[in-house]
Image: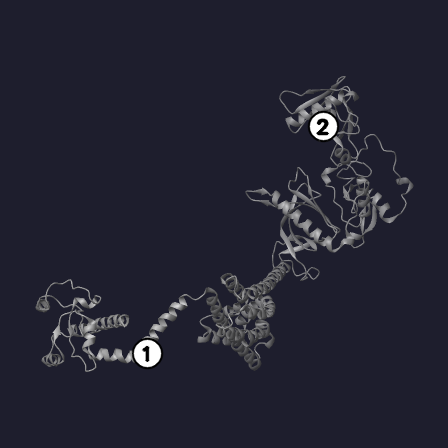
Amino acid sequence: MEREGDNLVTVFNLLTVMEDNRASHKQQAKDRPSPKSCSASSRVGQLKPFSPGLLETPGAETKDPRSEQEQHGSMSKKPQTLMEPLFDMTPGPWQSESLEEQLGPGHRAVSTRLLSSLRNKISDGVWRKSCEATVNISKQLQEPEENKIVRELLETEQTYVSRLHLLDQVFFEELLKEARSSKAFSEDVVKLIFSNISSIHQFHSQFFLPELQRRVDEWAAVPRIGDVIQKLAPFLKMYGEYVKNFERAAELLAIWMEKCPPFQEVITRIQNSEVCGNLTLQHHMLEPVQRIPRYELLLKEYVQKLPADAPDQADAQKALDMIFSAAQHSNAAITEMERLQNLWDVYQRLGLEDDIVDPSNELLQEGPIQKISFRHSSTMERYLFLFNNMLLYCVPKVIQVGAQFQVRTRIDVAGMKVRELNDVEFPHSFLVSGKQRTLELQAQYVLFWGRSQEEMNTWIQSCQRAIDQIGKRHETFKAAVQGPEGDTEEHQLKSEELGIRAPQWVRDKMVTMCMRCKTPFNVLTRRRHHCRACGYVVCAKCSDYRARLKYDDSRLNRVCLECYVFLTGNLLPEDKEDKKKGILEKESSKVSEQSLMCSFLQLLGDKWGKASSRGWCVIPRDDPLVLYIYAAPQDMKAHTSIPLLGYQVTSGPLADPRAFQLQQSGLVYSFRAESEDLKGQWMKAIDRAARGPSFTGAEGELSD
């Protein structure tokens, strides 16, 4: 009872302050009280000062020592405040003295009207309801986190279903009605734009939302949501079709909004309505695409907030896994949609050629490249498109109307080979050898950075991955494994591929004579030609043959004599039989691969018939006492040879630090290396060879 009395006193004190505040506002609103109002107030009560004990707890001592009369006398000397004037109302018949005693000294009585209002509120239970609301708010603030997530899931689902209703029952239906009545656009256009939105709407509005609402209503008895989500997850795969069609739908919507006024009028009218919420149709169409990631996010947070021993822990985790799988399916659909869109863009840039347009193709890499010319010492700008099954070698068009590139060659990845070229003249170059054609390519020049080694490696790795992937799918077409006879097997494999795979052409400048008959080339009578089967540079006489090559759709091509015999099986005519090779008939490329020393040297003096010429000089490993001089690195026959035994090697004139000489019995050969370091290597190798066989090892190596 004492505690209840204290609470009641506190309530009366607060009500008194509220009435004082209200009375003071009324008093200040009047400049001067009228006689009529004064007489009325005198009948009601007498003006009394504000008691400082009003805001104090019961029983507290008053800090102002002045008496009530002194305080009343000072009222006229100081300005009024909002809390000072109060009316002492006559107590009502229901108010007892015990209440005044309970209030204690220093407290004023409250007006009858205010107490009557308080009594009515208490009797009606208004205060009890307000207290219960406060308790409910406190409980809500202490609500478990997982409950808040479930409530958020329900609220967002209700909003989402309303958006689906807008798409399905408003936009979709209104456009269908317009299409049937005006015939300005086809119904198929509307169906393509909205895809399977009706199925999605029916599932969420008729199944998932009612199930979710029922479970939330029964949450106190059944605090579980995982089993409901598990029923939802399998149906989320229907979003794959919607997501795949989304890009195309947005494109169709933009096209018909621009070219069809009735179509535009329907869309604009709905978008301007209040139900659209100042958002366009495109915004609402995006909601189904974003919904599955939203489910995954909420459920993941729900699982994290659940206690370890919660009854919904196992079901919720299983539901999260299923939602994750559905999200992956949706993401895969988005990725596939992007892949097809990129593929279509590439086809448009290539002119939409029928033989390359295939949705199963996958673009792996594209970019500019430099093609090394076989005829000239130069490169040409080209463009490559690498797909999972083919490499397109293209030429950029000067006037890019429609297609941007013209396809020159299509090389199948099946059977293709790629490797880096160690070419000093063309660094960062690589070879792509396919059945249709073989290309020598160089990484594109980048301003301020030069040619990129990384770019070349990227192309090689991308081509090799494509080759490996298609090789796994076509195991029967893999190349045979080399046996113990490494060189023999490799040569045999090349012979078997003769005419089946496009060869690597030998560059024109790498030879000065026919690679078959060894006759020197000249501008007028002996011009250079390439054998389309082996790639050798041959003269017109040695390439006056035709054979059908499989890599060129079995068309007749110019081939050399040896390839003609191999491909056709015809016997070599007697007048074409090889005669015995001379001492200089050593193929430069093979000798250089097995050499002790080889490089270009400048030949100085009148001995060589010119004031100065350049030659490819080689000391073979199998003949280490002879220096062979070729006109070019790929020549089949040496221009001359110098037996090194007995020669002395000395430095040349002091004016040229890269020059050196060979001297013997009045014969002098002068050379100039490309660097002083290379000059030192040549002088050391020649000096050892000139001392005779005692300075060579068992395998031809020069010994100290």
Q: Measured along the vertical axis of the image, is residue 369 above or below residue 669?
A: below
Colour mode of the rendering:
one colour
Q: Measured along the vertical axis of the image, is residue 388 above or below residue 145?
A: above
Which picture quadrant has residue 629?
Answer: top right
The percent coordinates of residue 104 (x first, y second) are 19, 70
Which picture quadrant has residue 59?
Answer: bottom left
- Residue 605 visible from this viewpoint: no
The percent coordinates of residue 583 (x first, y second) are 83, 30
Q: Amino acid at mark 1?
A: Gly
User: Which label was assigned to residue 610?
Assistant: 2
Left/right of residue 584 with respect to residue 365 in the rendered view? right
User: Which label was assigned to residue 125?
Assistant: 1
- Residue 222 visible from this viewpoint: yes
* Residue that appears at 69% across and 49% down: 464
Q: Secondary structure at mark 2?
A: loop
Q: Measured along the vertical axis of the image, is residue 561 above or below residue 333?
A: above
Give the class, few, some or many, for how many residues have Cα within 10 Å of label 1's Cα (few <14, many ≥20): few
Give the camera-side residue of 372 and 626: 626
Give the class, few, some or many, for how many residues have Cα within 10 Å of label 2's Cα (few <14, many ≥20): few
Q: Measured along the vertical axis of the image, is residue 44 above or below residue 135?
A: below
Q: Secondary structure at mark 1?
A: loop
The percent coordinates of residue 586 (x first, y second) are 80, 33
Q: Assign the N terminus to one quadrant of the image.
A: bottom left
Q: Amino acid at mark 2?
A: Lys
Give the camera-side residue of 13 and 369: 13
Left/right of residue 367 with respect to residue 355 in the rendered view? left
The percent coordinates of residue 613 (x first, y second) are 70, 30
Give the camera-side residue of 207 and 18: 18
User: Which label was assigned to residue 578?
Assistant: none
- Whichever of callouts 2 and 1 sits on the residue coming sooner in the sequence is 1
| Residue projecting furthest to the top | 665
